[in-house]
Image (cartoon, grey):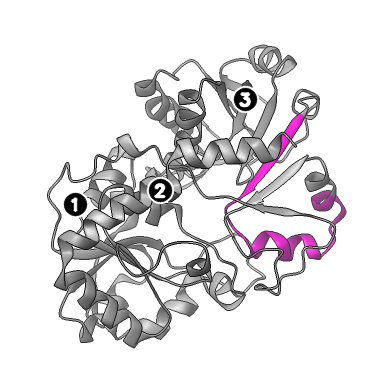
Amino acid sequence: MKILCAGIIARYPFGGVTWCSLMYLLGLRALGHEVFYVEDTGECIYDPILNTRSEDPGYGTRYIHAALEPFGLGERWSFVNFDGTYHGASRETVRAFCADADLFVNLSGGSWFWRDEYARIPRRIFIDSDPVFTQLALAKGDPWYVEFFRGFTHLFTFGANIGTPACDIVTGEFAWHKTWQPVVIDQWHPSAVPAGDCFTTIMTWRIESFADVDGNKDREFLKFLDLAARAPQRLELAINGPQEFLRSHGWSTVDAMAVSRSLWDYRAFIQGSKAEFGVAKHAYVSRRSGWFSDRTECYLAAGRPALVQDTGWSAHLPNGEGLLGFSTPDDALAGLDRIASDYPRHASRAAEIARECFAADRVLPALLDTAGR
């Protein structure tokens, strides 16, 4: 098949976001499909050098090229700036690809437009990486937003409980299919780098989107604020947030943007960790969405165990060895001790779970099968 993939690499030019799009591209290509990347959000890019949104797309387009070119995709992308100008491949090239494309994959709002060339692609799917927030926004009934989602033939979400009795989010006319972020396992080289001595994560304290939903990570994290002072293990946060406040409560902190500046920085930070300790956004937890983190999948693929807050994902994924869920501070302390007490066993199981549950050659065929119905 010919597959057009829309993502947000330039809009959020950081390692974790980049890996999300890249692993769709690499995973689909490995299955024999022809892929092309487009970014068409109508928004300005974020320029981390200037620490501001910029009307000049130069940083973003250079970043896209630097991310895709090492994988032989340096000529297979196009960025549409907010002013309608095309960078990388031309509009004519994009239109020509779309003319006989079979599938349009819109990841996390990589395009908010229904250009004629996208709309004519026979199968069109949206992949929702922000469950709860997306469905609550749809429930408001904003006409343009509702019409936008009506343009897709299938909708997928990382929230495994969305649309089921386990989650109280109203989905209305829209049916959401469960999927996970695909991971290209050989890009994470399990055990290629010696494990460090810290339980770590990479996180943003508050997100700027969906500002009217009080569902951010800061609200949930405060329940576990004293954990670092109680735990014998060292806990380190690569965080975009109140570092001084967190350090005063025993957490080690580093700048999230610094460790996420590129694909390689992000991967090196994860590979150099002992394991992950991760708290989820309040909206994911309180609504029992079943959301599971693409970042956590990368820890597992790198052979690093993960101790992460249960959003309802434990009903769908292995829980107890290699991947452990928690709901309370005492649960979290016990999980830290379990991993530390038999680290080799948990590390080995982590890599197995990544292969069994998240490998691109397992996730993507199931997604394509559903999209083809």
Residue 272 shows which numbered tag? 1
Which kind of residue does numbered mark 2 sit on? Glu
x then y, percent, for residue 93: 64, 12
Q: Which residues are magenta?
A: 123-146
Q: Is residue 268 left or right of residue 155?
A: left
For residue 307, above or below residue 62 = below
- Earlier-in-chain disc, 2 versus 3: 3
- Can residue 132 be seen? yes
Q: Disc 2 and disc 3: Cα gap in Å?
A: 25 Å
Mark 2 element type: helix
Which kind of residue does numbered mark 1 sit on? Gly
* In front: label 1 or label 3: 3
Quarter in which the N terminus is drawn: top right
Residue 356 shows which numbered tag? 2
Q: Residue at x 41, y 77 (%)?
A: 221
- Earlier-in-chain disc, 1 versus 2: 1
Say if the magenta span includes residue 82. no
Residue 3 shows which numbered tag? 3
